[in-house]
Amino acid sequence: MSRGALTAYIDSDNVWYPHFLDAVVVAVAALPEVDCVYDALVTKAHPNSKGILFDDFDRVRLLLGNFIDLNTVVHRRSLTEIYGGFDEALDRLVDWDLLLRFTQDKPAQRVPVLAAHYRVVDDRRVSVTRPFEPNHSAIRRKWMASGPEEAQAVKAQLSRET
């Protein structure tokens, strides 16, 4: 239902850093060719993040699993008009699916700004109350068929990991 030129997301248990939105609006204005940006997430809950989640954009890695927290994403409204919003058939990992759609034609741009602090305040989070595997498999099936080059790269990466 957003009507602004830009859309940003925040979960009810997380917080944005002061001036995050101001900084990202300036950054997006300076990048007219970019439709989707993401910033740094401070977290103790994400494995292997060392306290900050802010890796370079990598489409193959994104196809393998989400490494960009939605609380750090800002995108132009046009992406929702082109690719749609959240897939309501999913009850978990909707952010991963959304980012895969929003970056299928152009990569997201990493912007060096502290965006959000990820907090774990209770055990009622979707990541705890909804099953992972059916949603993960549904997204993988959908995106493995997205293009032969991407599917080949993902399969090669998966075989290296096993």
Image (cartoon, rainbow, N blue to C red):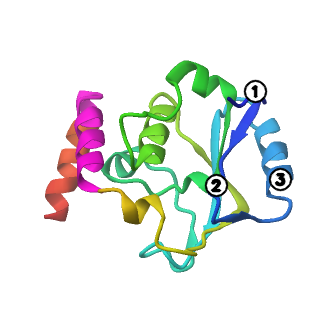
Judged by depth in the image, the label closer to the viewer, 1 or 3, is 1
Label 2's element? helix
| Quarter-of-image position of residue 52 | bottom right
Say which amino acid is labelled 1: Arg
Residue under label 1? 3
Judged by depth in the image, the label closer to the viewer, 1 or 2, is 1
- Residue at x 29%, y 56% (from the top left corner): 131
Mark 3 packing: few (<14 Cα in 10 Å), some, or many (20+)? some
**In the drawing, what numbered circle is on residue 13?**
none
Left or right, 97 with reference to 16: left
Horizontal and vertical percent position of residue 39: 66, 56
Judged by depth in the image, the label closer to the viewer, 3 or 2, is 2
- Residue at x 28%, y 49% (from the top left corner): 136
Horizontal and vertical percent position of residue 121: 58, 75
- Residue at x 54%, y 57% (from the top left corner): 69
Q: Main secondary structure of the magenta part?
A: helix
Residue 66 highlighted magenta (yes or no): no
How far apart are labels 3 and 2 at the CA level? 12 Å
Magenta stretch in the rendered image: 132-149
How far apart are labels 1 and 3 at the CA level? 20 Å
Q: Looking at the image, is 125 positioned above or below residue 80?
A: below
> Could you tell me which quadrant the C terminus lies in?
bottom left
Residue under label 2? 72
Say which amino acid is labelled 3: Ala
Label 3's element? helix
Residue under label 3? 23
Left or right, 74 with reference to 107: right
Closest to the observer: 62 or 10?
A: 10
